[in-house]
Image (cartoon, rainbow, N blue to C red):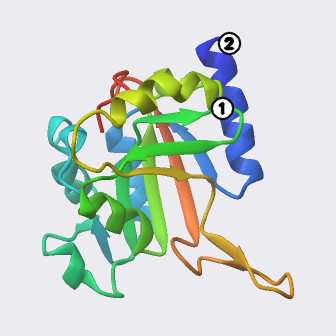
Amino acid sequence: MTTTANLSRFMEAARRVGAEVTQMDSLQDVAVYVAEKVNGPTLVPDTALAAKHDLKVVLGNAGVKVYEGDFRKAGHFPKAGFTFSNFALSDTGTVVLESTMENVRLATTLPELHFVVVDPETILEDNLSAVQPMTELHLGAEPRFVAYITGPSRTADIERVLTIGCHGPRELHILVVAGISSDLMEI
């Protein structure tokens, strides 16, 4: 499947499960988008891609309040989390993040809003095409965490009452930006 076909299929699948999906031209456009949606502190983990793209400065210049403290002490007040993805799956609209770093896990689960950037070059067709990168992500002796995120957090109780945002973000915003990184191991 071509990159364009994977992207179209991914966007459709992600929207079907409740994610907001927007194509953007640059991280500066992303920062403006985030600033318009968030009124409060935003958790931005120190990852390789965040450093490479000077993400905290880009977000700050757009007016986003980037939280600089210990994420564990952020408590109930962070409004948003911002991450990159390693790759995404077009058949389910899922974003995949290597989340061994605790701050990545906290940024994707504590706040009401989660913004995640996906490079269209990293959108794979399905789980089968993710076997090789998943194997690479799990190399090494130490335990590794990998998050598969499909839409906003949701749960249903025994009476089949659906609740959005009970165990994580109420909103998932997937921001598709070309040229971020085509390396499936980089986040």
The quadrant of the picture occupied by the C terminus is top left
What residue sits 69% from the left and 19% below the top? 5
Dot 1 corresponds to which residue?
90
Does residue 48 appear left or right of residue 30 in this picture? left
Q: CA distance from mark 1 to mark 2?
A: 10 Å
What residue sits 60% from the left and 68% below the top? 153
Could you tell me if residue 101 is visible in this image?
Answer: yes
Asked whether 61 or 168 is in front, the reply is 168
The quadrant of the picture occupied by the N terminus is top right
Does residue 165 appear left or right of residue 17 in this picture? left
Q: Quick check: marks 1 and 2 in contact, CB under 8 Å?
A: yes
Locate residue 103, reporting x and y percent: 25, 63
Does residue 177 appear left or right of residue 151 in this picture? left
Asked whether 4 or 165 is in front, the reply is 165
Q: Of helix, strand and loop, which one carries label 2?
A: loop
Q: Earlier in the sequence, mark 1 or mark 2?
A: 2
Locate residue 145, reporting x and y percent: 36, 52
Could you tell me if residue 63 is visible in this image?
Answer: no
From this view, report whether residue 175 is shown above or below residue 81.
Answer: above
The image's mark for residue 1 is 2
From this view, report whether residue 77 is shown above or below residue 13.
Answer: below
